[in-house]
Image: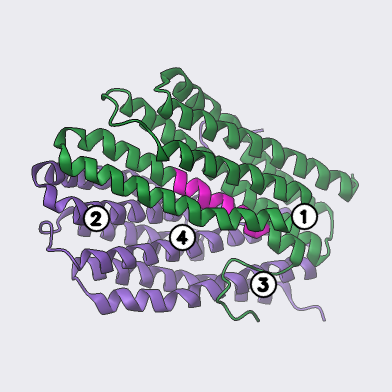
Chain colours: A green, B purple
Amino acid sequence: MERHFEKDLNELKERLLWMGSLAERSVHQAVHAVLQSDEQLAQRVLEEESAINELQIEIDDRVVHLLALHQLMAVDLRFVLAVSRINNDLERIGDQAVNIAQSAQRILRHPRVKPYVDLPKMSEAVEEMVRDALNAVVRRDVALAQKVLARDDQVDGLRDQIFRELLTYMMGDSSVVYPAFELILVAKNLERIGDHATNISEDVIYIVQGRDVRHPAVDRR
Amino acid sequence: MERHFEKDLNELKERLLWMGSLAERSVHQAVHAVLQSDEQLAQRVLEEESAINELQIEIDDRVVHLLALHQLMAVDLRFVLAVSRINNDLERIGDQAVNIAQSAQRILRHPRVKPYVDLPKMSEAVEEMVRDALNAVVRRDVALAQKVLARDDQVDGLRDQIFRELLTYMMGDSSVVYPAFELILVAKNLERIGDHATNISEDVIYIVQGRDVRHPAVDRR
């Protein structure tokens, strides 16, 4: 029962975007569980993880079926392989949201270390990276993908600033070592989410331009 | 110019294993740069990164060419897609080795926090996970892949122990906060390497048994 390639491909894209929106929402909720000390929001992230995991498996199955039913040109193969990689990145973004939600639950047991200033900035930047990366996939928008890559440096800068500030707090007051350490883990998780958005954007450039930007220093064959 | 499928597939496997051995060596060298305060070893890891990056691109190209030249059965498609994912995991193991090497360079500027006890244990366990995961790929050995999955819990336990101990040091002596923090980052990097070895092992089980073990709680369709 041969089905039309375009139809299969469009369905695949739709499911990938749906997965992207779930992952995006998980990150948003997890970060706000930390920032607003919201235990219920943290719980919701944990409950919604399985939907993302099910979608990952469904999308992988769709990729296998699509490749089994259709003999694709190299350009379409690259796209489908990129979808398979993006699928993985989105699932891991979901994992990181779960880690943040679990940190939120532990942080709630301690008094607040200090007013959060850089953490909201970093999380806004990371959430925008994820949103832009997904939009870049839909629109095959290389300029937007490149904006995501540029943003990653800013996110790493914010991460370093958060680390420095929290370490300074830890040196000044040993009672904040545990909750400050949890906030460091949250910043590490946000960094990883930014890395995944970067991977997705590199895949967009790979799809559209047919060139690999993952390792610019590499002498391409 | 159609080439024989088996030949292409074997070449692909060989290149993947070569990449695996490079990634494995990078991890080993980076960890020993930390443990033995060896600046030169850290430098070598940074220099060898580009070989891994080049191989990643080469293997991705081979995957595209293989799929473009041959119409594969679902079982072979699953294998080739798994190779593409394992390729990604190996490259990221290389990235983590680079992070550890850079931490080694920063740690060298400080006096040693304490004799390293759990860090060598954790790094040995993680290196064994990577080695076993690669052997499981070669031999399509599900039992070995499952051993890797079981090992990951032990690695997470060692990580928690390292965190607890370093945080206790930080609380007792504020002058060790910076080098202790670098060691925490090294343990985080080792944890991620273990996660990648776990992903590879899950792919082995997926290849051999045709079932997905990534999310055991998920109700499979």
Please state the chain letter of the residue tagged with numbered disc 1 in the rendered image: A
Q: Distance of mark 2 from mark 4, alpha carbons? A: 30 Å
Which x, y percent locates residue B23? 43, 69
Residue visible at 39% across and 74% down in the picture = B46
CA–CA distance in space, label 1 to label 2 = 45 Å
- Establish whether labels 2 and 3 are both on one chain: yes
Nearest to viewer (mark 2 / mark 4): 2
Q: Residue at x 48, y 36 (%)?
A: A97
The Cα atoms of the two marked residues, 3 and 4, are separated by 22 Å
Check disc 2 and report the residue beneath it.
Answer: B183
The one of A76 and B130 positioned closer to us in this rendering? A76
Q: Chain ID for label 4?
A: B
**Image coords of residue A179 (percent x, y):** 27, 33
Query: Around disc 4, counting alpha carbons within 10 Å, would you say few (fewer than 14), some (14 to 19), or many (20 or more)?
Result: many
Q: Which amino acid type corresponds to the residue marked 1 in the rendered image? A: Leu
Crowding near the residue tagged with mark 1, few <14, some 14–19, many ≥20 C-alpha atoms within 10 Å:
many
For mark 1, what is the residue? A67
Look at label 3 and name its amino acid. Arg
Q: Which residues are magenta?
A: A190-203
What secondary structure prevails in the magenta region?
helix
- Can residue B72 be seen? no
The magenta stretch spans residue A191? yes
